Image (cartoon, rainbow, N blue to C red):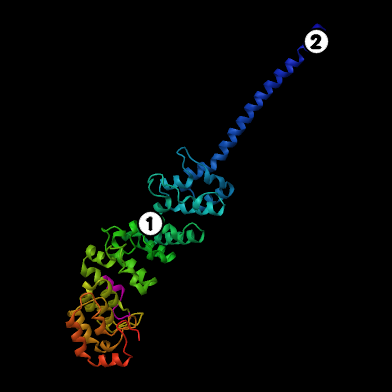
Amino acid sequence: GEMNETIKSHEGIILETMQNDIDVELNILVESCERMLDSIRKIPGKFLHNKVRLHDTDVIKTVIKAFPEALLQENDKGELPIQSTAGVFCTRFIPLLALEAKRQNIDLDRGGLLLPHPIFPNCNILQQLIMCGDDDEEKSSWFQHIWREFKCAGLLFERDYIEYDLLRFTCFETRLEQLDCLIDLYPTTLSKPAFKGNFPIHPDNYDHQSSIEVFARLLKAGMKYYPETFGFLFRRNGEGGERAITRAIAVYGKEETLQTIQNIIPPNEDYAILHYVFRFTPHLSEDFIYRYPDAMYLKDRHGRQLLHVALKRGLKLSAPLFMMIHSNKASIEEGDPVTNLYPFMLAATGEEVDLTTIYKLLTLRPEVISKYFDDGDADVDGTQ
């Protein structure tokens, strides 16, 4: 009886002690379960970090579909799976992880393509992916498919070409197929400056150690999408900068550069290329007349004769101009549709008037003076 009384008197303490012991055990059990669950939850992430290259794409897609949050799991270095995959150069799995992140609506900008590369911190993964894309028949076809898929999935935009200088990373002899593909996806990038303000076709935009083939590919693409400007061949880099053709000649030599241009812009086509030459690079006029003799008879898209452009440019009587005049005498009596001036008048409007040129034009076609007055006594600016 005395024992029972003692137990009853300490019943509260005993129950409290037992409850505390139970709580401790439960906490230990809960913590153990949480650690186990946490460890289980990390398994898909560890798989994506360490085992990706050991499995085919169907297995990886299955894992991501079941555990999409694994794409956001960091390893001990603080890297996400797409970064660690890039770090071991498993190139073919990077697009898979990026595209699956997009499909699973994972909150990861561009599927992780813009994250810094773990080995090359000055590059993002998208840039590094391009640098791994050296051409061979199988790899080139695969990369072209990837770039198109990136564009369709909203992972590749035109602004990336400028912001991340993507074209420059493909301006190598070993990546020409990728270069073609990227241009075909966003051809307007040919018209926009990127690296140091350089336009893509300008040789200063890519490695001078490359052969002229890179320049040729860019010119060919430019002629495909911008034939009216001759693929930006005569575009100047910034105010006062060198023109693309001038720089190409300096880098690759005149003969090789002009032959490359002629291969891509055939002389037998109706390209008024001499108009551009006389406007922007008159020092090359004789070289181009030799290669494009029939272009002397063409008019540009404004209806101007080559003689109009040359005289407006201020060219004095010289071998190219003499050849031009005698090969197309009819142009002497044809007014310039842009300025409404006849050739002899254009020759008189330059900063340094060359009387010899004016005299030669008038002696070849003196009737142009009476024609000028018959047109209505126009002023020199073309108004009535």
Tell us which disc is closer to us: 2 or 1. Answer: 1
Label 2 sits on what residue type? Answer: Asn
* Range shown magenta: 260-270
Q: Is residue 56 visible?
A: no
Q: Which picture quadrant has residue 173?
A: bottom left
Q: Give the position of the N terminus as an image quadrant.
A: top right
Q: Which mark is residue 84?
A: none
Label 1 sits on what residue type? Answer: Asp
> Residue beneath label 2, please?
4
Which element type, helix, strand or loop, lies under badge 1? Answer: loop
Q: Position of residue 166 (x, y in %)?
A: 39, 57
Q: Is residue 77 above or below residue 372?
A: above
Relative to 356, 66 lies left or right = right
Query: Total of numbered circles in the picture?
Result: 2
> Residue beneath label 1, please?
165
Report the Cα–Cα distance between label 2 and label 1.
Answer: 88 Å
